[in-house]
Structure formats: structure tokens, C-alpha cells
Image (tube, rainbow, N blue to C red):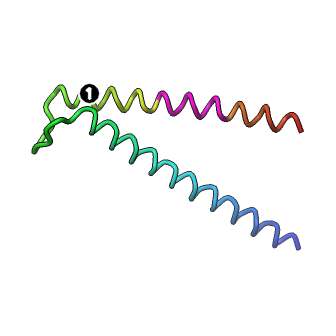
Amino acid sequence: MAMANVDKGELMDQVKQQIAVANAQELLTQMTEKCFKKCVNKPGTSLDSSEQKCISMCMDRFMDSWNLISRVYGQRIQREQSKF
């Protein structure tokens, strides 16, 4: 019986890891699409310096916003769980 619990725990860890990877991929995809659309008006063979700077700043803001939202959401979940 204990072995079954270990297997379930390992399975849950694997599922959590797969979800985390999928979330990271989705975050990267969204960030890339939004920042490219915002910063690159005429796609060409390379990015000029202003496009590079815009993309860099856009990605920084996107990540800062995502981190803030994640932190606040995590705190909210903890508060809700502590009520029970």
C-alpha cells in the first residue's frame, strides 16, 4: 500500500512539472507575440537597435507584470485556504 502512495506522489510531481513547463511555454509564446507585434512594425532580416530596445523593455515589463500577478494570486489562494 505504501508503494502505491509513493507512486501517486511521484506521478503528481511529474504532472506538476509538466504543467509548469506548459505554463512557461505559454508565457513565452504570449510574451513573444505581444512584444513582437508592439515593437516590430516592418519585419525584415534583422532588428534595428530601437526594435531591440523596445522588445527588451516590453519583455521586462511583461515579466514584471506576470510576477506581480502570480505573487498576488498566490497570496489570495493562501488566504482563501486559511479560511477553511
Q: Quadrant of residue 32?
A: top left
Image height of 55 relative to 3, above or below: above
Q: Quadrant of the C terminus?
A: top right
Mark 1 closeness class: few <14, some 14–19, many ≥20 residues within 10 Å = some
| Residue 3 drawn at (x, y percent) | 82, 72
Residue 16 position in % (x across, y down): 63, 56
Q: Is residue 12 magenta?
A: no
Tell me where residue 4 sits by quadrant: bottom right
In the image, taking residue 80 as reference, residue 11 lies left or right, namely left
In the displayed structure, 12 sits above or below 51; it is below
Q: Residue extending furthest left?
A: 45
Q: Residue at x 78, y 66 (%)?
A: 6
69 falls in the magenta region = yes
The residues colored magenta run 64-73
Left or right: residue 1 compared with residue 65: right
The quadrant in which the N terminus is found is bottom right
Q: What amino acid does circle 1 point to?
A: Cys
Choose between 13 and 81: the one closer to the eye: 81
Residue positioned 45% across, 32% down in the render: 63
Residue under the point 47% across and 27% down: 64
Q: Which residue is mark 1?
A: 54
Which residue is more in the foreground, 81 or 16?
81
Q: Is 12 displayed left or right of 31 in the figure?
A: right
Q: Position of residue 83 (x, y in %)?
A: 87, 34
User: Total label count?
Assistant: 1
User: Whole-percent x and y of residue 11?
Assistant: 69, 66
User: Is 77 on the left or on the right of 58, as rendered?
Assistant: right
Q: Main secondary structure of the magenta part?
A: helix
Relative to 53, is 47 above or below?
Answer: below
Q: Residue at x 63, y 61 (%)?
A: 15
Residue 74: which quarter of the image? top right
